[in-house]
Amino acid sequence: MDQLFYLKECSSTNDEVSKFLLYENSDFIGVSTFNQTKGRGQYGNTWAAAAGKNVAYTLAVKAQNVLLSDFIFNYYTAVVIRDYLANLTDNAVKIKWPNDMILKNKKIAGILIEKKKINQNNYFIIGAGFNVLQEDFDEISHAGSLLKQTGQVFDLEDFVFNLHGHLSEKLKNISSEQDIIDQFNLHLYRKDEISVFEIGKERQNGIIRNADEKGELWIELEKDGLKPFYHKEIKLLY
């Protein structure tokens, strides 16, 4: 079963999707809204979006159909969503490790993947928020939108319909693990460029070298040399 449901308003599409998983063959069920009031980001962060200008979307995929580690599955989802945005805008879209989409140095989308047991089945719940038509981001200096970054106006209904079709199809035909890692690193934001990082309260120059199969990011630091980091252990200042 492959269906997409639209909600006029909801607190979080990641929370709402479980209501649609009623049947044993429920798979690739998508839920979207253009007015999400309490969106969640990765590791407890919040995702705020202006009503009627952005897209909140969640896809439920049965875990038994995914023969990848959680980290590699996260990478693959990021690559697939990156490809969709790059093809849509005809622009270079980068993946800011581990789960943000960057277009012209601004964050235009974020991904949150949760694993849940619903009606005796384990699911990957893929949630994504997309800034599509929003123009004002107040004090959020790192945020942008498809409109602001490209000047293109996208129809929200077409956007989410095509996204759902693209993501569902790609998740039915998953690439090899090595290809996923290669594609993730190919599009990794600020890879092999000198950047400033924050570790604890200390700032240090470093160069992102690669992301590995364990979900770690390898950074060559000015003082400490080449070291691996998990998310939240280091912050890229951009």
Image (cartoon, rainbow, N blue to C red):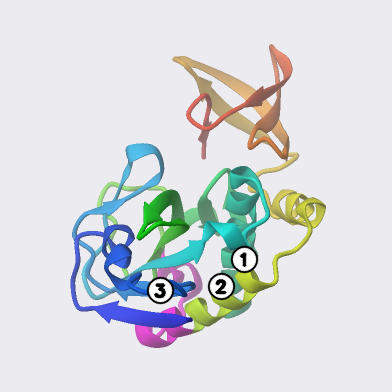
Q: Which residues are magenta?
A: 145-161
Q: Which residue is mark 2?
A: 167
**Badge 2 or badge 3: first in the primary sequence:** 3
Establish if 87 lies above or below 41.
below
Q: Residue at x 56, y 44 (%)?
A: 98
In terms of secondary structure, where does tag 3 sit?
strand
**What's the distance in space between the residues labelled 2 and 3, CA to CA?**
10 Å
**Badge 2 or badge 1: first in the primary sequence:** 1
Q: Tell me whether the residue at label 2 lies in contact with that at label 3, contact meaning CB atoms closer than 8 angstroms.
A: yes
Residue 103 part of the magenta segment: no
Q: Which residue occupies the foreground of this view, 24 or 126?
A: 24
Q: Which residue occupies the foreground of this view, 188 or 111?
A: 111
Q: Residue at x 33, y 59 (%)?
A: 14
Q: Which residue is mark 3?
A: 30
x then y, percent, for residue 238: 51, 40
Q: Residue at x 56, y 72 (%)?
A: 167
Query: Given the image, on which type of amino acid does mark 3 rest?
Result: Gly
